[in-house]
Image (cartoon, rainbow, N blue to C red):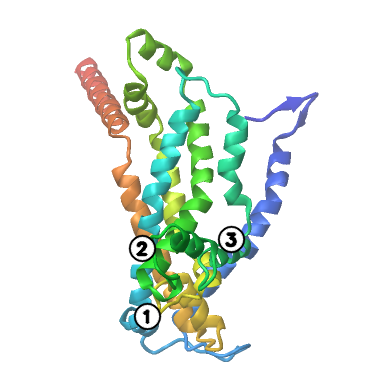
Amino acid sequence: MKTKLKGISYSKYGYLFSIPFVVAFLIFTLYPTIYTATLGFTDCRGVLNDNYHFLEHPFENFKEILKNDSFRVSLKNTIGIWIANFIPQISIALLLTAWFTSHSNEIRGKGFFKVVFYMPNIITAATVAILFHSLFNYPVGPVNDILVSSGLRDSSYYFFTNKMASRLIVAFIQFWTWYGNTMIVLISGVLGISPDIYEAAEIDGANGVQTFFRITIPNLKTVLLYTLITSLVGGLNMFDIPFLFLSGGPDRATLTTSVFIYNLAFSGNYIYNRAAAASMIMWLLIAFFSAILFYIMRDKDQIKIDKEIKRAKKEAKRAAKGGVNQWQL
């Protein structure tokens, strides 16, 4: 709708304000994506190699990546670490959301607790990696000191040589970093639910647990979908903590697909075509899993309503056509 004042149209300024975003998106997102996808079908290797050609067998790089043992290991690690951190992340975030948004129990200092829980999200990844490397250090470190002084162990334990321990530490770091952000998003979603619904539930005698599972969760479906998608995208692109913490070790235990792609492209290998192919495979996997989540989290009731509306419109059109035909006869 155009807004006019004294015969002047202001709608064009909306397009002007969107130009910086469109230009930035085209230069820094769309072009790199298309260029990366193109490199996956070429023989491009080496720094500043402009003399590359399209392969005779276009999908050769993709086949080689899928056959690569390190890529398969990194994919398993990525999915495993993401699941290990997302399940407790969403669970704790939902629990804190229920606590902060409870209508029956008013909590003092909510703002302070929200800041404390969100604080890990604003700390840089390099700082977090150094912090946890120091905490679990061997032979002297706070965690080992606690284990030895409490009598749980006779001597210090080298966490960074154990595959499972290393994966769990990385998963915990991811959980600790992001649960506060997830909590804030969920709280924002709860605040968007009409208070009248909660008042009606309270009058009907619903307790806090019933209100949370029967009212809050169903009305948070869209926000939960957003949280799942963003966590999926971030989890499958996990790079900074695994790379800065142990560089993918020990023995590829924390090697993620992003670290694998980085090693192919920039760690002395410069195999840009294979790295680009691996990137596009991950893009396809993220799109596939996102589509599954959209399908699972779809609003079935709204779909039924839309179908009923379409059916009613078709019947109305048929009835109108029948009336016109009778009038013509």
Residue 90, placed above or below residue 187 = below
At 34% from the left edge and 18% from the top edge, which residue is drawn? 207
Answer with mark 3 or mark 2, whichever residue precedes in sequence.
Answer: 2
Residues packed near mark 1 inside 10 Å, few (<14), some (14 to 19) or many (20 plus):
some
Residues packed near mark 2 inside 10 Å, few (<14), some (14 to 19) or many (20 plus):
some
In the displayed structure image, the side of residue 178 where residue 28 appears, left or right: right
Amino acid, disc 2: Ile
Amino acid, disc 1: Ser
Answer with mark 2 or mark 1, whichever residue precedes in sequence.
Answer: 1
At 52% from the left edge and 77% from the top edge, which residue is drawn? 262
SS under mark 1 = helix
Residue placed most toward the observer, 2 or 259:
259
Which numbered marker is on residue 128?
3
x and y, in percent, of residue 158 in the image? 44, 73
Amino acid, disc 3: Val
Residue 328 is drawn in which quadrant? top left
Name the residue furthest top. Answer: 203
Q: Which residue is under mark 2?
A: 79
**What's the distance in space between the residues labelled 3 and 2, CA to CA?**
21 Å
